[in-house]
Image (cartoon, helix red, strand yellow):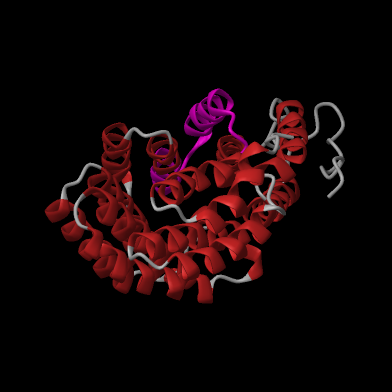
Amino acid sequence: MHNDASPSLPPPHAKIGHVHVRHLRAMTSALRAVDYRYGGGACRTQVQAMLSWCDKAFPHSAGAAVRRDFRCAIAELHALAGWTAFDAGLGGSAHRHFLLALDFAQDEDLVANIRYRMGRVHLHHGGPAEALGMFRLAGIVANNHHTNAILAANQAWCHAEMGDRVAALALLGRAHDEFARADVDRAAPWAAFFDVHDLAGITGAVYTSLASTVDPGFARPAITSLRQAVTGYRDDMARSRTFALIALSLNHLLEGDADEAAVTAGLAVVQTGDMMSARTRKKLDPLHAEAGRRRATTVRELITPLLAAPSHAA
């Protein structure tokens, strides 16, 4: 994608109109798709270019309805900027963008989604308790079954990381119940990623954490859910499929099947090579460590070059 993808600024003293808001949302959607497919490093420059345009356009006058929609669209773009920074390994930048997104947000469910993403940063960096607090805070303003399903599933993941089997399974059950009541086809653009395949993926992630912290027997249901996710993810969700493949390989190791772990790791490595995503590389660390403990040489040999390669944070 080229960098100069923003509409022309209106002349001085002219108004921002619905056409500008529509264009901004269309570009945010397109850049979100690049992030899902190729990683945050593949579109951060374009996201920053759009934010620069927003900075110049925002002082222009606009009617009350347009102003509200424009603020919400800018919030969506800042949320995407935070997510791409997070994926590229730039935690400080991610935090700043998420806070700006909260300042601009006019929609309670968008606020919930932004706080969910802030929680995911904590969870990724080994802070499940902090992440849990953020997910609970998001739940205060969440106002539909779909968002509640996202939050319950991620709270389950936090409890699994902390070794709390009972709470993890209870919240995972709630996530599935909420999802069954959700109108997924009408989900907001920032939450549309969470479909039946992503629910299977996070279910597999919860079971994977329980297999590591509570009982290796959870590797079996993890494998079942992760296979469903891997099969269901389309190419436009390549990063999510890669995460599921990495977790799937880890669970095969936990079950003692080094050969199947190597096959699955090979598939993950092929996709990881196309990703400009520091987060994807980091998710290989537990698999690499488990392969070392189990002397799964082939798996380690597949992963080691990727871990040694420079990270992309373009």
Report the label total.
0
* Corner quadrant of residue 133: top left
- Vertical side of 2 occupied by 149: above or below: below
Which quarter of the rendered picture does the C terminus lie within? Answer: top right
Task: Look at 25% across and 59% down and name the residue there.
Answer: 216
Queried whether the magenta region covers residue 249, the answer comes back as no
Q: Residue at x 47, y 32 (%)?
A: 102
- Tell me where residue 203 appears, x and y as whole percent: 34, 63
Pick the residue in front: 31 or 104: 31
User: Could one spot residue 194 in this view of the protein?
Assistant: no
> Toward the viewer: 13 or 188?
188
Q: Is residue 27 above or below residue 180?
A: above
Q: Residue 207: give x, y in percent of width and height.
A: 29, 60
Q: Is residue 225 left or right of residue 53?
A: left
- Is residue 95 highlighted in magenta? yes
- Asked whether residue 49 appears in the rendered view, the answer is yes
Residue segment shown in magenta:
88-115
Q: Quadrant of residue 148?
A: bottom left
Q: Is residue 253 left or right of residue 94?
A: left
Q: Position of residue 128 (x, y in %)?
A: 30, 37
Decide which of 45, 200 is in the foreground and name it. 200
Image-based side of 29 in relation to 158, left or right: right
Could you say which quadrant of the image residue 252 lies in? bottom left
Q: Residue furthest left?
A: 166
Q: What is the x, y in percent for residue 154?
A: 33, 50
Query: Magenta part mainly helix, strand or loop?
Result: helix
